Image (tube, rainbow, N blue to C red):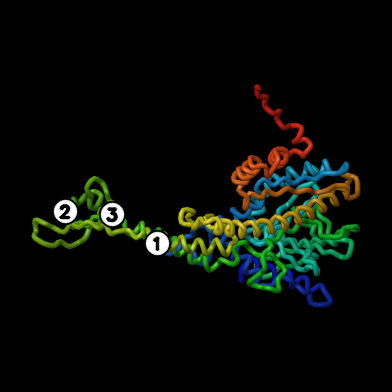
Amino acid sequence: MTKFTKMLDLIINVLNKDADTQVDVCMTSQMANLIELWTRMYENRSPWVNNKDVSSANLAPAIASEIARLVTLELKSEVTGGPAADYLNEQYQRKVIKDLRRYVEYGCAKGGLIMKPYITKQGIEVQFVQADCFFPLGFDSSGRLTQCVFTEQFRKGQKIYTRLEVHTLQGNRVHITNRAFVATNDYSLGSEVAVNSIDRWSELVPELLLEGADRLLFGYFKVPLANADDSDSPLGVSVYSRAIGLIKEADRRYSNICWEYEGTQLAVHIATSLLKYNQDQDKYEYPGGQERLYRNVDYNTGATDKPFIDTFSPEIRDTALFNGFNNQLKLVEFNCNLAYGTLSDPQSVDKTATEIKTSRQRSYVMVSDTQMALQDALEDLVYAMSFWAALYGLIPAGNDYEVSSDWDDSVIVDAELERQTDRADVAMGAMSLAEYRAKWYGETLEEAAKNLPEPALTEE
């Protein structure tokens, strides 16, 4: 049983012990194991990687990184509106947008990410909680998270301290509880103690009931893919969840290539009688100090004046191996909704216009869906930031703000090619110059018409 799965079981046991009926938990042990697997793959600790026979080709982090890059490419998101908007937007830009791509990568890799704001003496802070550090327990019919547990654990001496922070949506209010436990082993949470009796958590309250909140006070981003491993689970899945076996085979083929280069290195087999023996160092000395080049053998062949020496220089099979590896990468790309040539060799990809468009569209749909999921999470995050800021008097109460997000569409649109096409349309009269300026210079049609150059005067 993995650490993450074990913690899930311990949490369920605690909740069931306090409840009159058994708690219906949406996170299963199967999903907990998958999250653990996705995490190991992202950290290049896949179960099949031993760095002897099989090495990692770093595909999982590359896939998550590329999708996160495409999702957040040239993202412009801001909070606008009333008096509260300026304060919220300042915090939003510095605490969220500035490093958003990095955290979206973690979410893409592990299937989900929670952005949880909280108040400190300095103002609003935002904690980014990765999928292997929180436990979603309940969702409503619309797929919105209604109960979640966050864990914090540390060791001090022989004791293990664990804090469970449970967030539960109850109609138009949020119930938050902080519970602390002390144990001497990893097999249980141990005995429950007052949360503020532990120095690290001395400023926390055991229970908090927040009125007027219609959702949990954080943003929950989950990858918008169907769960092929557990179709009943509402949890998000990793962007490479459908390519686990393919990535495993790609790692094996990559390792074969590495071994091919190592196993076919030039070597000279030489009889020990041809080598000078250094008695002081108790070893043979190789010509020119090239120990890597020579491999000594303990027998001689032929006449005594012609002892054994042979050159080992086999033909390397890199072309066939690279073709096999490249074809495997294409399978990974397809199953991870990436355009061909993202991981594989772009020179080996068929480049008909239809194939390029289809490949880009597959990537575009994935990126577009992920952007919409991220936008929902960001709006929930700003809602939570506004709620906490108003509660502590940092801004006026109310929702007098709006979150706007502008996403880049260059994944599918080749801007330079489109611009050349528009110029051709202008030349043939299918598009006016004012329309061209409005589209490419960010002007209104009226502004574009005013900014058109004066027609050149010609002499009669």
- Considering depth in this image, is 181 or 90 the residue closer to the camera? 90
Quick one: quadrant of the N terminus? bottom right
Q: Nearer the viewer, residue 72 or 236?
A: 72
Q: Could you give the CA–CA distance between mark 3 and mark 2, rounded to whole angstroms?
A: 19 Å
Residue at the bottom extreme, as displayed: 21
Residue carrying label 2 = 274
**Residue 458 numbered mark, or none:** none
The residue sitting at the top extreme is 459
| Label 3 crowd (10 A; few <14 / some 14-19 / many >=20) | few
Quadrant of the frame with the C terminus: top right
Amino acid type of the residue tagged 1 in the rendering: Leu
Mark 3, residue position: 266
Total labels drawn:
3
Residue 133, how many percent across, how many down? 68, 60
Residue at 87% from the left image edge and 65% from the top image edge: 170
Q: Secondary structure at mark 3?
A: loop
Query: In whole angstroms, how far apart are the C-alphas of marks 1 and 3?
Result: 19 Å
Question: Along the polypeptide, which appears first: circle 1 or circle 3?
Answer: 3
State the residue position of label 1: 321
Q: Position of residue 338 (x, y in %)?
A: 58, 58
Q: Image quarter for residue 239? A: bottom right
- Residue 438 figure quarter: top right
Residue 313 lies, in percent from the top left, at 26, 57
> What residue lies at 48% left-to-right and 64% top-to-bottom?
328
Name the residue type under label 3. Answer: Leu
Q: Check disc 2 and give the amino acid type.
A: Leu
